[in-house]
Amino acid sequence: MTGGKGMGGWEGGIRVPGIVRWPGRVPSDTIIGEPTHLMDIYPTVAHLAGASLPQDRVIDGRNLLPLLQGSVQRSEHEFMFHYCGSYLHAVRWYQESGALWKAHYVTPKFNPEGAGACYEQGMCHCFGEAVTHHNPPLLFDLLRDPSEVNPLSPNSEPLFNTIVSQIKRAVDEHQKTLTPVHDQLSVYNNIWKPWLQPCCGSFPFCWCNKGSGDDHISI
């Protein structure tokens, strides 16, 4: 597989293992090859709890239980949108006919040159000079080319323009449902904030002198 976790929409970062254990409810020793979203956990847990999902917004996740229990063989996702941070990089389309396509609109620049991942920094950047934009997008037939090494063209795939247009329409519809929110993954939201840590002394010297002698607990 090309790429890895944190490296855009390449399959090497999408097809990472997940483990589910629920004796008596989920069959053991079963391998499910369908990719799913972390967003699927919310509707799955809501279903198990007997709760209803909000009706005032689009819920991108799907209930995983039928897939986990083997009553269906395919994910309910017709389209899956692969983001790098807040930037849409790729879209996969699972047609009812069984065809499986992936369109890459943006790909990270791997390093060192010629590598299959971002080895120098360990994680690819999502935008700017660290990525390449593709118009038309890179299109792959994931059933025949799961490693994504042979991009299709109008010459090699007669339905190229039709497939790309259909995926673009799905992207447009998807983006209409998005509402801008505060960036929860910003640098400020992820740095250590000592003023928020428990402190039973005089900040910033958070020493808890509740013991005897030289017993100090630093929090």
Image: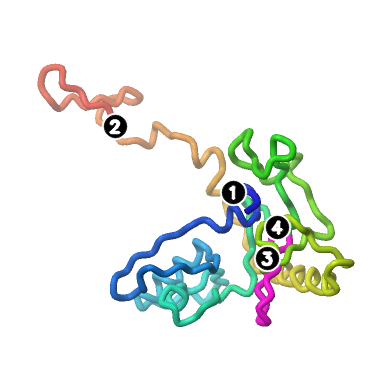
The quadrant of the rendering that contains the C terminus is top left
The amino acid type found where label 1 is placed reads Gly
**Callout 2 crowding tier (Cα within 10 Å): few <14, some 14–19, many ≥20:** some
Magenta-colored stretch includes residue 151: no
Does residue 171 appear to the left or right of 160 in the view shown? left
The quadrant of the rendering that contains the N terminus is bottom right
Residue occupied by mark 4: 148
The amino acid type found where label 3 is placed reads Leu
Residue at image location 29% in from the left, 26% down from the top? 206
Q: Which mark, residue 4? A: 1
Q: Which label's residue is closer to the chain start, 1 or 3?
A: 1
The Cα atoms of the two marked residues, 3 and 2, are separated by 54 Å
Mark whose residue sits in front, 2 or 1: 1
Residue occupied by mark 2: 199
Q: CB of mark 4 within 8 Å of CB of mark 1?
A: no
Assign a secondary structure to mark 2.
loop
Task: Determine the residue located farthest toward the left in the rendered image.
Answer: 212
Q: Quadrant of residue 117?
A: top right
Q: CB of mark 3 within 8 Å of CB of mark 2?
A: no
Q: CB of mark 3 within 8 Å of CB of mark 4?
A: yes
Q: Which mark, residue 142? A: 3
The amino acid type found where label 4 is placed reads Glu
Assign a secondary structure to mark 1.
loop
Measured from the top left, where is residue 168 in percent x and y? 77, 68
Mark whose residue sits in front, 4 or 2: 4
Q: Which residues are magenta?
A: 90-103
Q: Which label's residue is closer to the chain start, 3 or 2?
A: 3
